[in-house]
Image (spheres, rainbow, N blue to C red):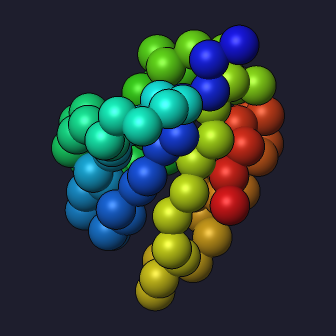
Amino acid sequence: MLIRYVGLDVHNDSIKIAVAEEGREPAKFLASIPGENSKLIRQMNKLGPSRSVRSYYEAGPGGYTVYRAFTAVGIHCR
């Protein structure tokens, strides 16, 4: 199973998404989307089954809303 690692730059009005696959290739910019969890989850679902996606971000003033939305639908998030 190919694992995809997703880095998120989360702001109130936008979320930037970068993806790196297992191995030594650098991460690639995927998209910049509005800061809405439903749109973010839609983008994540395009990357493959939730068991093959690992997402990471630093919670800021917006708190842990992305973490809660991801874990509610079974997407790994730290």
Corner quadrant of residue 67: bottom right
Corner quadrant of residue 11: bottom left
Residue drawn at 68 percent across, 24 percent down: 52
Residue 60 visible? The answer is yes
The residue furthest front is: 24
Q: Check the picture and name the quadrant holding the N terminus.
A: top right
Q: In this view of the protein, which residue sits in the foreground, 66 or 20?
A: 20
User: Residue 28 at what x, y percent from top left?
Assistant: 26, 37
User: Residue 13 at what x, y percent from top left?
Assistant: 25, 62
- Numbered label tally: 0
Q: In this view of the protein, which residue sits in the foreground, 7 or 12?
A: 7
Q: Check the picture and name the quadrant holding the C terminus.
A: bottom right
The residue furthest bottom is: 61
Residue 38 visible? The answer is no
Relative to residue 23, is residue 14 depicted above or below? below
29 relative to 58 in the view: left or right: left
Residue drawn at 46 percent across, 16 percent down: 46
Residue drawn at 27 percent across, 51 percent down: 16
Corner quadrant of residue 27: top left
Relative to residue 20, is residue 35 depicted above or below? below
30 relative to 38 in the view: left or right: left
63 relative to 10 in the view: left or right: right
User: Residue 21 at what x, y percent from top left?
Assistant: 47, 29
Residue drawn at 41 percent across, 55 percent down: 8
User: Residue 18 at what x, y percent from top left?
Assistant: 33, 43
Relative to residue 8, is residue 50 depicted above or below? above
